[in-house]
Image: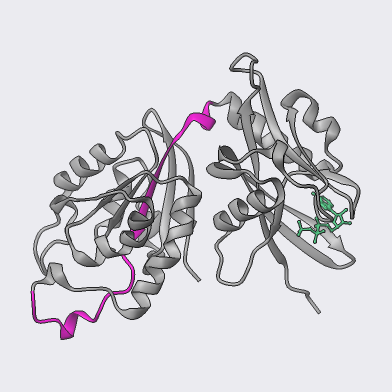
Amino acid sequence: MNRPIRWSAGALVWRPAPGGSPTDLQVLLVHRPRHDDWTVPKGTVERGEVRPVTAVREVEEETGVTARLGVPLLELEYEYAPGRMKNVAYWAATAVRGDADAYEPNKEIDGVAWVPLTKAAKRLSYDSDRSVLDAFAERLSSGALDARTLLVVRHATARPRQRWRKDPLARPLSAEGKNEARGLRPLLAAYGVHHLRSSAALRCAATLSPYADTLHRPIVLDHRLDEPREGGPEKKRPVAEAMAEAVDHKRPVVVCGHRPVLPRMLEVVGVDASAVDADPLPAAGLVVVHHRRGEVRAIERHDPH
Ligand code: ATP
C-alpha cells in the first residue's frame, strides 16, 4: 500500500552579517536535541494551510524570527521513517522581526544560530539540506534574491451573478467568499505584501480587505482592471498600464482581479497566459511572480484548500 506523502515547508532565512560587508551573508539554522541534528527550519503543513504560510509559521516557532518569503528554492523528498516519504518546499526568506538570540531553548529546538553562509554546509547534518544551500547560492549568483514580488489574486467567491439586480460592481462576496478572503490574510503576510490594488468591483476589494484592515493599508481601486461588460471588448491596453504601475512598486504588491482578465494581467509581467488559461485559478487562488528588471525569476501558484 502506498503511504501518503507528508507535506512540509520551511525557509532559509538570510541576512548580511552584522558589521560585515554586504556580501558577507549568514543563514539561520536550528539544532534539534531529539535528532541531534542541525537543519533548516521547517515543519508539517497543518489542515487548511498553504505551504508558504507553513514555512513562515515554522520559522517563527523554531527561531522566534518572523520571516518574509522571497523566491522559492526547491522541493526535497526524503524517507523520514521506513517507507514514509516527506516532501519539503523551501523558500529564501529575510527576517522582518524577532531576535534569534533571544529564543528560549526547549525540547524541540535547543539552539538557533546565524551561521556564516560559507560555514553552513559543514554545520548541516543532511546532504539534502545542503542542496537547499546550493539552490540558495544559485539564486544569489543570478541576482534572484533581489527580485520584486507581485501577487495576482482571483477574487473570492461572490454572491451569484444571476440573482444580482443592482450595480454589477457592487455584487458582494458570499459567506464562503468572506472566509476565503480571511484565509488570504496569512498568505499575503507571508510575502510581506505592502501595496494593495484591485479592480473597482466590491468583490475584488473585499477579497483584500481582511489583510488591508490588519495592516492598516489602503486598497487602491483601479477601473482599468474591471471585468469587460458582457459581450464587450477586452481592454488590453488599460490592463497593461494598470499592471505597469503595480509592478513599479519596490515592495511586494498584490493585485486582485477577475478570472477573464487574469491572463492579461499576468502577460504584462512576462508570464505566459497559459499558466492560468488551461487551468484557471479557483476563487481566491493566486499566482506569485518574482521578477527583476522585466525578467521573471520564479512563478508560484497557490490554490486555497
Ligand atoms: P518536523 O516537524 O520538522 O518535520 P520531525 O522530527 O517530525 O520534524 P524530520 O525532521 O523529518 O521530522 O525527522 C524525521 C527523520 O528524518 C529523522 O530521523 C531525521 O534525522 C531525518 N531527517 C530530518 N531532516 C532530514 C533531511 N533534510 N534529509 C534526510 N533526513 C532527514
Q: Position of residue 278 (x, y in %)?
A: 39, 63
**Could you tell whether 142 is left or right of 152 in the image?**
right
* Magenta stretch: includes residue 162: yes
Q: Is the residue 165 above or below the residue 92 in the image?
A: below
Q: Which residues are magenta?
A: 143-166
Quarter of the rendered image showing ligand 1: bottom right
Q: Position of residue 174 (x, y in %)?
A: 30, 78
Q: Nearer the viewer, residue 139 or 192?
A: 192
Q: Nearer the viewer, residue 2 or 285?
A: 285
Identity of the residue furthest to the top in this view: 21
**Could you tell whether 30 is left or right of 81 in the image?**
left
Q: Position of residue 22 (x, y in %)?
A: 58, 17
Q: How is the image coloured?
A: one colour
Q: How many marks?
A: 0
Q: Position of residue 68 (x, y in %)?
A: 53, 43
Q: Nearer the viewer, residue 289 or 27?
A: 27
Identity of the residue furthest to the bottom in this view: 163
Q: Is the residue 141 above or below the residue 202 in the image?
A: above
Q: Residue at x 81, y 79 (%)?
A: 1
Res 204 → quadrant = bottom left
**Could you tell whether 40 is left or right of 192 in the image?**
right
Q: Is the residue 36 above or below the residue 135 in the image?
A: below
* Magenta stretch: includes residue 300: no
Q: Residue at x 35, y 40 (%)?
A: 270
Res 142 → quadrant = top right
Q: Nearer the viewer, residue 142 or 248?
A: 248
Q: Residue at x 48, y 56 (%)?
A: 187
